[in-house]
Amino acid sequence: MFQNYKINKLFILLLLIPFILDAQEKKKGLLEQMVSPKVSFQTTIMDRGTINNSEGGVELNKNSIKINNANLSFSYTNWQFDWNNVDDLPFGDKVSQPIEEMHSLSLGVSKAYRLDQRWFSLSSASINATFEDSLTDSYNIGLFSFASYAIDSDHSLQVGFFGTYHPVKTIALPIISYSYRARSRDGVQVIIGFPRTYIGYHINQDTLIRVGATASNSLIRLSNTSTIEKEGYSKFEDYMVNLGISYDYSNKLKLTGDLLYTVQRDFTIYDKNGNELNNYEMGSSKGVMLKAILQF
C-alpha cells in the first residue's frame, strides 16, 4: 500500500519516548499545563488517489511539527508527492512529477478569556505561507474567534466565526458546534461541528477510541517554473472519515493514531491572478495518521 514511503526517523525516535519518560510523574495543575509549551509531531500517509477519467494518481506523505503554548504557536509542515502514470495526467508536462514537495509555515497568537462559570471565549490571529519553492504571493492571514456556553456540566455550545484572506480566495465562515462531555476522561464524548465531528468512548481514563469526519484544504503557491501553472496556485481539498485511538501515556506525552478514508477529494488549479482554470475530482484513498504531543 505504501511501498514508496520512506520511514521517518523522527517518528522512530518518538516510539522510544514512552520508555524514556517517567510514567509515574505527578499531574500538573491546569494553569501550569496551559502556560507550559507543547511540541506536536504528526505524520500522515495516504495511498494512491487516482484523478477521475485518468490513469494518473498520487500518493502523499505529510509531516509536521508544531510548538505552542496558551498564547503563541509556530508550525512547519512538509508534503511529499509521488505521482503515478504522469503521462496520463490531465496537467503537467506528461514526463516529470507535476509537484514533488511543498511547505507550509504558520505563526499565530491567541488569547482565551473565562468570562464567568458558563462563558468562555477564545480568539486568534495567524499568518501563514504555503508554497512549492517561493514565498512570493503565498501568504494568507487567518482570524478565528468563538464563545463557548456551558449549558450544564456535560453539554456546551460554541458560536463564532473563522476567516482567511488569501490572494486567490477569501473565506468567511460561521462556527456553530455542540460538545458533550468534551473534557471527560470516562464514558462517551461527543463533538459535532465543522471541520471536525467525532464520537468517542473512554475504554479507561487514559484511552479514548473514536470515529468521526474531518475536512481540510491546502492552497499552494506553485513555483515560477511549475509544469502545472507557472507562478499559479493549486488546492487540495479533502473530506474524510477516520477511526482512531488516543492514549495519554503520562502528563508529558499523548499518542494518537488514526485510520483514514477519503470520501471526496478535489484538486483545483488557478493562474497567477487567482482565476480558476480547472478542477479535478480524485478517487478515494486510504491512509494512516500518527501523532505525538509532548507537554513540558
Image: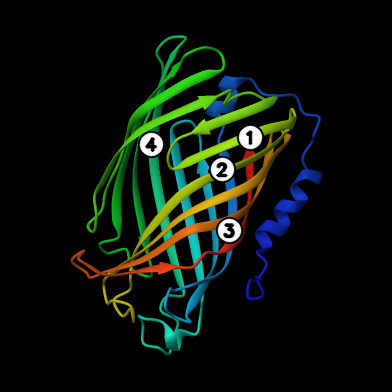
- Give the mark, 3 or 4, whose residue is nearer the N terminus: 3
In the image: residue 225, left or right of residue 120: left
From this viewpoint, which residue is outermost toward the top? 117
Q: Quadrant of residue 294?
A: top right
Q: Quadrant of residue 45?
A: bottom right
Dot 4: element: strand
The N terminus lies in quadrant: bottom right
Task: Please say if the residues under marks 4 and 2 sit with CB atoms less than 8 Å apart.
Answer: no
Q: Is residue 68 left or right of residue 2?
A: left
Q: Which class describes the residues within 10 Å of circle 2: few (<14), some (14-19), or many (20+)?
A: some
The residue lying at 48 percent from left, 30 percent from top is 70
Residue picked out by circle 4? 109
Q: Amino acid at mark 2?
A: Gly
Secondary structure of residue under mark 2? strand
The residue closer to the viewer here, 266 or 234, is 266
Give the Cα distance between marks 1 and 2: 8 Å
Spatial CA span between label 3 and label 4:
26 Å
How many residues crowd around disc 4 within 10 Å: few (fewer than 14), some, or many (20 or more)?
A: some
Left or right? Give the position of 200 relative to 117. Answer: right
Disc 3 or disc 4, which is closer to the eye?
3
Closer to viewer: mark 2 or mark 3: 2
Discs 1, 2 touching: Cβ within 8 Å: yes
Neighbor class of circle 1 (other Cα within 10 Å; few <14, some 14-19, many 20+) is many
> Residue 135, percent across and down?
32, 63
Q: Which mark is residue 200?
A: 1
Q: Earlier in the sequence, mark 1 or mark 4?
A: 4
